[in-house]
Amino acid sequence: MLKKINRFLFGKKDKVTQIDKTKTVLYRKQTKSSHTHSANVVDSFFSSIKNVGHPDYPILDSQYSSSSRIPCTDLVPFISKRIIEGDTTSIKIVMRRIIEANPGLGIGSNWINKSVDKILSIPFENYVSFTSASAFPELKALFIVAAKEGSNREFLIIKETPRLISWACIAHQPSWSTHLHSLAKKANSWIDEMAEDVSYWQDYEEFDIREVPNASIGTELQTVILALTPAARLQLFYAVERGGGSLLNLTDYQIRSLGINVEKTSKELIDSGILLPSSSKEAIKSGHSKQELVELCETHGVTYKKSWKKETLAEALEKMDPTLLEKIAKSRNLISPNYQRYPSLRNVVRIADEHQVGFKLLCFA
């Protein structure tokens, strides 16, 4: 009987031990498989941007110093998909590559991992909702890319970042919760605390959220904009704000800092029909500096005065030869927003900027 009892007890223990060992081996296999999967995903991503970026740091823009951490492409689609797949490892690998050339003095590059984890844990849904399922992954991806600067998210409110995030996300039709008021109080408390030591914050206007933003864009225009990548949306809004111009030049440092391949996004915008080749005076003005217009007048023998503004110089060129503006526009690849097809396009920047306050307050979520 004693032997039977011992066999029962020890046999059970051996079985439990075997199960524990099996779990350990399975966990190790899963972890190894996960790392292998992430490596394959990252390799595939880098293959897609081959010969686009910096020769030494392929993920960075070759036009800027590698220490500036400016991506050569839009990272948001990649990061968004990884968020949906629950693949944080790939996100962290790519973000470490972004800061690799300038990780920070003596601190290494692993700090970005904590930033990624923190952003992924933010309950943005407590403060805003969207009409499209891809909105939250894109929102988190935009904040993750912005985190490469290394400062706390609160400091983004003095940069263009919240405005650009609003441009990228406005087509998702944000609907703000009244919980935004609690973020305003939190933000104002932070500003007051900063003002005790730094004079800059003493003059910073505090948040006064009497009504949450509620303007929205039309459904037809929303569908077209959502079909664009986030970087292309930023280029679109920049073009609309300026009334057109030379397509490849319709970005600025802040947009490039979030990551953009301008040739790729320019093709997106032209193919979508939301921007059109144009020889309008607005496109001519936006696509040229005053000095360039003066030089065009001299080249084509157009009489002008140095005191003239760009619009008057463009009119003088047109008066000299009605086809001249068209020739100039073609040589510079000038475009204008397609207001005839999408008249509400005139209002998108204003609507997005109304929502900017909400995205600023999300920096305190």
Image: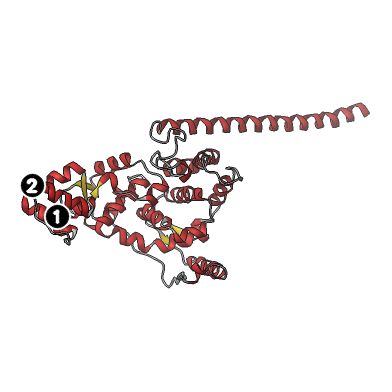
The x and y percentages for residue 307 are 17, 62
In percent of the image, x 13 and y 51: which residue is there?
A: 297
The answer, for residue 338, to whether it is visible in the render is no
Residue 142: where, in percent of width, then height? 45, 49
Q: Is residue 92 above or below residue 1?
A: below
Q: Who is closer to the viewer here, 70 or 25?
A: 70
The quadrant of the picture occupied by the N terminus is: top right
Of residues 87 and 249, the one drawn nearer to the viewer in this rendering: 249
Q: Is residue 202 visible?
A: yes
Q: Where does label 2 land, which residue?
A: 323
At x 46%, y 61%, the residue is 157
As drawn, is 365 to the left or to the right of 18? left
Q: Disc 1 residue type?
A: Ala
| Position of residue 304 in the picture relative to residue 75 (left or right) | left
The image shows residue 358, relative to residue 144, as above or below, that is below
Foreground mark, 2 or 1, reads 1
Which residue is most to the right? 2
Residue at (50, 50) in percent of width and height = 149
Give the crowd class for mark 1: few <14, some 14-19, many >=20 residues within 10 Å: many
Q: Secondary structure at mark 2?
A: loop
The CA span between labels 2 and 1 is: 12 Å
Tag 1 or tag 2, which sits nearer the N-term?
A: 1
Q: Which residue is mark 1?
A: 314
Residue 216: x and y, percent?
A: 33, 60
Q: Is residue 41 above or below residue 281?
A: above
Query: Residue 277 shows which numbered tag?
Result: none
